[in-house]
Image (tube, rainbow, N blue to C red):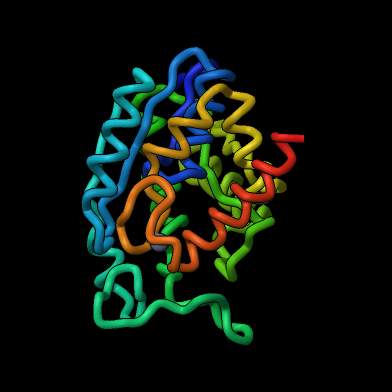
Amino acid sequence: MILDRNKALIVFSGGQDSTTCLFWAKKHFKKVYALCFRYGQKHVVEVDMARNIAEKAGVPFEVKDVSFISELSSGCSLTDSNIKMDEERIGVAPPNTFVPGRNLFFLSIAAVYAREHGIMNIVTGVSQTDFSGYPDCRDSFIRSLNVSLNLAMEEQFVIHTPLMWIDKAETWKLADELGVFDIVRNETLTCYNGIKGDGCGECPACKLRRRGLETYLKIRKS
Ligand code: ZN
């Protein structure tokens, strides 16, 4: 399979991070595709919002159902409404918002999809800086998986992680530089309670997002 270096596939959820990455990819590659996953998340509205953003961006959008991944493990508060969300990691264990294997599954499926469509570049919005205790957001994992995927399929995929070393405030700055600050602020869904834009303001994802936004808005004004 010949992979086109001008093509990029974004693992897209419609949240702040992957939306910023989608526009980053549009700037750096001629043809961008968005792949979204249904993985048993409580807020399926997430998928509709992701589709709307992709449409606005003029990027082909596809959804794959991988709900079985949340059936493999118990105890995740993102996919089980009966479990109260951890605010942050406690001790050495990841918080219960962690979906074991999620990025491993997503990126592996993305690579097979990319191979089928002749896409060389795969873009993901993971970040080690805001590392909330998710081991599969770390740079070492992504690099290792990139090697494994290439060995698995005898290909030359390149996984890009534009947000790996920047924090939430710098992610807002990047969105602003890409000219999509308002789209990211108003159209994306980061909130664990399923409220778009600035969200519920109370859940861990909203708090992290708001702290970053407030920091960036101060810098932006001055
Ligand atoms: Zn929230």
Q: How many marks?
A: 0
Indicate the quadrant containing the N terminus: top left, top right, bottom left or bottom right: top left
* Rendered location of residue 9, percent (x, y): 44, 30
Residue 50 picture quarter: top left
The residue furthest front is: 221
Residue 142 seen anywhere in this rendered image of the structure: yes
The residue furthest top is: 30
Residue 216 picture quarter: top right
Q: Along the line of sight, which residue is nearer the eye, 26 or 73? A: 26
In the displayed structure, 142 sits above or below 175; it is below
Q: Along the line of sight, which residue is nearer the eye, 52 or 39? A: 52
Residue shown at the point (70%, 46%) measured from the top left: 166
Residue 111 seen anywhere in this rendered image of the structure: no
Indicate the quadrant containing the C terminus: top left, top right, bottom left or bottom right: top right
Residue shown at the point (62%, 83%) measured from the top left: 92
* Rendered location of residue 175, percent (x, y): 57, 32
* Rendered location of residue 192, percent (x, y): 37, 62
Residue shown at the point (45%, 70%) measured from the top left: 98
Residue shown at the point (23%, 60%) measured from the top left: 67
Q: Along the line of sight, which residue is nearer the eye, 69 or 215? A: 215
* Rendered location of residue 172, percent (x, y): 60, 39
The residue furthest right is: 222
User: 204 left or right of 65?
Assistant: right
Ligand 1 picture quarter: bottom left
